[in-house]
Image: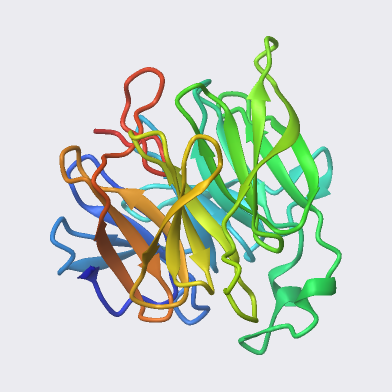
């Protein structure tokens, strides 16, 4: 493990841009911003303060999409020059609670998880609410049509919906932090996703106490799913059958998300909150490509 960038304030949502530079979220409320890192990680600049950005994705036109968790809970569209607009705050009149992670689907739509609890309810005075296990979670999965702006509900009642990804067949995967479960949704003939089905679980038998569960995740070109496990201090790797085949230790206990590096690099870049770094881990595979051949991290990488 090596640090690509240090001194980040609770980093999340790493995205590699076409020129080899990176953007990340810094979620600490004293920062609450999207940060742009140069291609060697040494130079950085603040793009925009949004409040508490949690997830990022970039489309083919270089728009940066932001899952903003508090100010207000919303989906935002951001440019590298700092200009920003709120695109959506609700679905069918029901406000978002905690927009979390983003991924582009093979249909070109943007998919977003909402953890289903207000940030202020799960984090109080900078600490995890000791009653976090009994909160009334109603985690949801949304599909956003970027042309019409329509927001559609795919699923609900998840116990802290978090990471989201697509495999090479267009199947949708979402994880549930409070249980450790990974679920998948089959793509139906109507170009819609069906009911959730269990895929696997990333919590180790000896994981200990405290808030532990899956966070961001991405597919590798090897067909395996790479999942950051918050509180467990690793990236857990599941094979196409949902079986855990490896646990790759991170520098701290709180990895939050990951993105694959450039083609041929065969590495993942992991945001880790305990040490405040974007770290690089060798994994022996590149990231999965979209069905149309476009490289994928947690976004639709424009390269």
In the rendered image, the residue lying farthest to the bottom is 125
On screen, residue 285 above or below 276: above
Please identify the quadrant where the C terminus is shown. Answer: top left
Where residue 82 appears, x then y in whole percent? 37, 56
Which residue is nearer to you in this view: 178 or 149?
178
For the point 69% across and 70% down, the residue is 119
On screen, residue 67 above or below 211: above
For the point 68% across and 10% down, the residue is 189
For the point 73% across and 53% down, the residue is 96
Which residue is nearer to you in this view: 115 or 223?
223
Q: Is 73 displayed left or right of 246 in the figure?
A: right
Where residue 134 appears, x then y in whole percent? 85, 72
For the point 76% across and 57% down, the residue is 159
Res. 64 in view = no
Q: How many marks?
A: 0
Q: How is the image coloured?
A: rainbow
In the rendered image, the residue lying farthest to the top is 189
On screen, residue 136 above or below 181: below
Please identify the quadrant where the N terminus is shown. Answer: bottom left
Where residue 237 appears, x then y in whole percent? 44, 51
In the figure, residue 153 lies in which quadrant? top right
Where residue 213 appears, x then y in whole percent? 60, 64
Res. 196 in view = yes
Q: Is 133 displayed left or right of 108 in the figure?
A: right
């Amino acid at each position: 493990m090596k640090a690509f960038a240090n001194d980040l304030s609770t980093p999340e949502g790493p995205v590699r841009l076409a020129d080899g530079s990176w953007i990340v979220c810094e979620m600490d409320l004293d920062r609450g911003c999207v940060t742009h890192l140069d291609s060697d990680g040494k130079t950085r600049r603040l793009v925009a303060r949004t409040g508490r950005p949690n997830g990022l994705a970039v489309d083919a036109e270089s728009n940066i999409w932001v899952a903003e968790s508090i100010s207000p809970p919303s989906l935002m569209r951001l440019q590298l020059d700092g200009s920003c607009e709120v695109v959506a705050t609700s679905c069918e009149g029901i406000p978002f609670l905690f927009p979390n992670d983003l991924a582009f689907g093979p249909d070109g739509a943007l998919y977003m998880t909402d953890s289903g609890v207000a940030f202020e309810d799960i984090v109080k005075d900078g600490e995890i609410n000791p009653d976090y296990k009994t909160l009334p979670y109603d985690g949801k999965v949304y599909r956003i049509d970027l042309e019409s702006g329509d927001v559609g509900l795919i699923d609900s009642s998840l116990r802290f919906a978090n990471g989201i990804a697509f495999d090479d067949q267009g199947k949708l995967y979402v994880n549930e932090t409070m249980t450790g479960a990974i679920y998948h949704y089959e793509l139906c003939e109507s170009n819609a996703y069906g009911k959730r089905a269990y895929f696997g679980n990333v919590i180790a038998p000896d994981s200990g106490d405290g808030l532990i569960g899956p966070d961001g995740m991405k597919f590798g070109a090897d067909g395996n799913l790479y999942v950051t496990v918050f509180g467990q201090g690793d990236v857990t790797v599941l094979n196409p059958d949902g079986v855990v085949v490896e646990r790759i230790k991170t520098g701290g206990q709180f990895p939050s998300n990951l993105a694959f590096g450039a083609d041929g690099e065969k590495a993942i870049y992991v945001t880790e909150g305990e040490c405040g770094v974007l770290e690089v881990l060798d994994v022996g595979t590149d990231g999965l490509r979209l069905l149309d051949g476009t490289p994928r991290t947690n976004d639709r990488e424009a390269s």
